[in-house]
Amino acid sequence: MTQPIAPAGADAWILGTRKGAWPLRPPTPGRGWKDWKLEEPWFFGCQVHHVVQDPRGAGTLLAAVRTGHLGPTVYRSTDGGRNWKEAARPPAFRAKEAYADSPLTAEDPRRQGLVVDHVFFLAPGHASRPGVWYAGVSPIGLFQSEDDGVSWAEVRGFNDHPSLATWCYNFAPGTPDGLKCHSVQVDPSDPKRLMLGLSGGGIFLSEDMGKDWRPVNLGVAMDFAPPKTDGSEYEFGHDPHDAVIHPANPRRWYQQNHCGIYRLDWKAGEKTQRWERIGKNMPKEVGDIGFSMTCHPQKDAVCWVIPMDGGTVWPRTSVEGKPAVYRTRDAGASWQRLDKGLPARAWLTVYRQAMAHDGKDPLNLLFGTTSGEAYWSGDEGDRWLNPVRGLPKIQSVTAARLG
Amino acid sequence: MPSALRTRVRFAALLHSYTTGASVVEVEPGTVSSVMAELDRRFPGLAFRIVDEQGRIRPHMNVFLNEYLIRDPTTPVAAGSELYLVGALSGG
């Protein structure tokens, strides 16, 4: 879920691509649906993994950018994208020398010195903490800014957690398919509760604002690992692709996982929480594999997913070459196929951050493909239109109020 | 030619946004690392675009010392020599 809460009054979509970010303006009412305006790109030639506008306060925009040569950084704009300034201190791991007195084992990759390959996910902090942002990076790491994105520091409770090297497979970088920290979510009802997804590693929760973390993965399949010999479940090592704390019901979590679609309804007072595989209610011939999952910002039973082919060698394209979005209106008990207006035959890939809503009523949805097309729906997915094609590989979609 | 007591640093165009447009500057000789430190004092944020947080030259940045490509930041940089900082991207 790239952006659970869209900025109020959103008037543009931001398409982050392999070669820059393009603002896309929808038609003004009464002008007809073809009157979309694709504006000139930001960060042309650079990889853009995420552009997020703060729904709090003045609406700072942050962009996760990686120039091929110059490495990763974060840019910020306080005027709706007209001017951008690079963070004075972008996310960077500590030098390996800083680990000299660390209790981590000598073999731990963090002691060899990690290098941020790219900033992957940006998330505004809790409403009660203006100016606080989080950034998930690849290789797996979490950073925090307390000055509205100007300077970034490691979330030490996570990056130095003694179990982190066990939770995730390794710290190898890679994009777009490498290991990364994503889906950083702040519980809107409690600033101390943070959730994030590790690909791979699983879903993790902190209840003390990032000082300590624990896995929350029971009930989630791990088809790519052999069954444990004692018959128990794996506690971590899973592969969530996209996860959300529902903004209107923070005790309800959803995730699109490498191994299915899940919902977790937190049960008060119970020590063990379990995910339920709501993807089992998808048509069997379609399955429940995918990257992105988008939740309605007010209705906690309404979500959209875009199934992909997860068979054999994982093509990650539309199942059987027939693109479709699926929607549930009953928290996953049933799903409706939504393909009106989508190509009858196409092998589309939609990345985990490449679908978003704009927070309006009625809700607008937009998703982008790796083949550079965007599809929009103004009726919650019943019909789709294709306002943009010919862009570079779309890696993220968000809504913003640019003015 | 750089002055006999200084080292000249030449920047490819992709770095000009960090150097306020300068394509050539002169710095104190020393090592690649010390040159980077001086450059970063003059142009904050520049060094991190060439050398990562572990002190290694980024994989797609090339540092030429005169006509030789170097990867070791401890390489001595003598007075009268020239460093050329340029991008080297591969793939599509």
Image (cartoon, coloured by chain):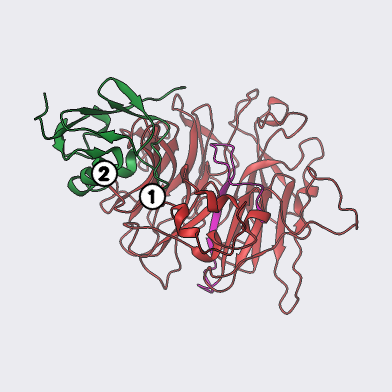
Chain colours: A red, B green
**Label 1 neighbour load within 10 Å: few <14, some 14-19, many 20+:** many
- Pick whichever, A394 or B55, lies toward us: B55
Chain name for mark 2: B
Which residue is disc 1 drawn over?
A400
Residue A177: name its quadrant: top right
- Pick whichever, A94 or A349, lies toward us: A94
Rendered view: B1 above or below A196? above
**What kind of residue is marked 2?**
Ser
The boundaries of the magenta stretch are: A167-192
- Pick whichever, B36 or A399, lies toward us: B36
**Label 2 neighbour load within 10 Å: few <14, some 14-19, many 20+:** some
**What kind of residue is marked 1?**
Ala
Please provide percent x and percent y for residue B74.
Answer: 34, 39
Please provide percent x and percent y for residue A361.
Answer: 48, 55
Which residue is disc 2 drawn over?
B34
The residue at the far left in this view is B3
Image point (32%, 22%), residue name: B68
| Observer able to see residue A360 | no
| Labels 2, 1: front one | 2
Image point (21%, 45%), residue name: B38
**Rounded to the nearest whole Å, what is the CA distance between mark 2 and mark 1?**
43 Å
